Amino acid sequence: MFPPNPTHATGVQMRLIGWAIALAAAGLTPAAAQSPASAPGTTAATAAPAATAAAAAPAAAAPIVYGSVGHAIPKEGVGMPVPGAYGIQTQVTPLGERAAHFHNFWLMWTITLISAFVLALLVWTIFRYRRGANPTPSRNSHNTVIEVIWTLVPVLILLAIALPSISLLRAQYSPPPADVTVKVTGHQWYWTYEYPDYGVSFDSNILKEKGDPTLKPGDRFRDPAGRDGPPLLAADERMVIPAGKVVKFIITADDVIHSFAVPAFWTKLDANPGQLNETWVKVDADKTGVYFGQCSELCGARHAFMPINVEVVTPDQFKQWIASKGGTLPGAKPAATPAAAVTPAAAPQPATPQPATNQAATAQN
């Protein structure tokens, strides 16, 4: 109906030619992208995104070396509950040894003697004053000597128990000057340990079992051979303290009330939100090893999954562990930057000698 428009046809042809050129350029782009990074034509702007991506990539976790500091293999039955056992765990601190002795000997013998005396008195009364042997009961209403005895004897027993108890409590809450301070914070449901004098801080979570359905891919699980500790008591990170040194614990919480308890240390203290509680331990120098505890306050749904792992090492091993955590020992000087670490751009450049210029000769020329 309308005559053909040569201008329109020319425009279509030009667009087709443009598309062909664009496709040809796109086909050459992959070849350019596959050029090596060290090619002479690589610019700083091209290399910058690659360097940024490499820096953003997460570093691979260091492999666990069992037997090293922080991953010592626990001794069976030491510092942990034993099935079928009874009594107090073997104590490894002077304060714990003193408390265990007070319980096992003084209190237990006192309770045993009182119970045996009352039982013997009860049996003697039953047979001596039964109806067949005593048809006419006594009319005595009181006896002064007996009343004095049964008043004074309980008082003396209470004093005999109270005096050592008060002395023990005083020693527990009157710590000597601390060599190491650890701040313990309870969360729902894990622990945070901070070493303020060394600049070290980390979280400690329970290690799940290998077949746990809630275990995420790539997560670390408890070693089935028990090298991390017993089930429900192994943690991914351990508190490490030196043997033979006074360690002060500053204990608090950030949500609800928890309780920091390590039975082998004779340590159990509540962690209250907004409050700092203090206690201390000094593990015997020859009692290095791994000791386990738990949160001992009903703190919520996962209360039973807040284990405490304390690894006691020698003072030299403790320093090595602090260094491995990126901490700094008090009084240590920062390491000097090696000369090789200085980049050529930052290194001072020597002055280039300039040829002497004879101003008079220049002026004449």
Image (spheres, grey):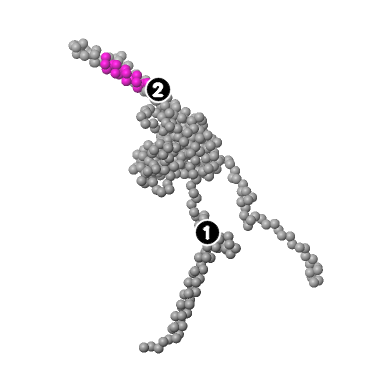
In x, y percent, where is residue 259?
39, 38
- In-image side of 171 versus 365 (left or right): left
- In-image side of 81 versus 345 (left or right): left
Q: Name the amino acid type tagged 2.
A: Phe
In x, y percent, where is residue 69?
50, 38
Task: Quote the CA–CA distance across marks 2 and 1.
Answer: 71 Å
Residue for badge 1: 50
Dot 2 alpha-carbon crowd within 10 angstroms: few under 14, some 14 to 19, many 20 or more: few
* Element type at mark 2: helix
Task: Residue 334: name its quadrant.
Answer: top right
Q: Is residue 191 visible?
A: no
In x, y percent, where is residue 17?
48, 77
Q: Residue at x 32, y 18 (%)?
A: 116
Instruction: State the quadrant of the N terminus.
Output: bottom left
Residue for badge 2: 105
Of 44 and 222, the residue lying toward us: 222
Q: Check the image and report above or below for 18 versus 305.
A: below
In x, y percent, where is residue 227?
44, 37
Mark seen at residue 138: none
Say if the magenta span includes residue 35. Answer: no
Q: Residue at x 41, y 87 (%)?
A: 4
Characterize the magenta stretch by its predominant secondary structure: helix
The residue range painted magenta reads 109-124
N-terminal-most mark, 2 or 1: 1
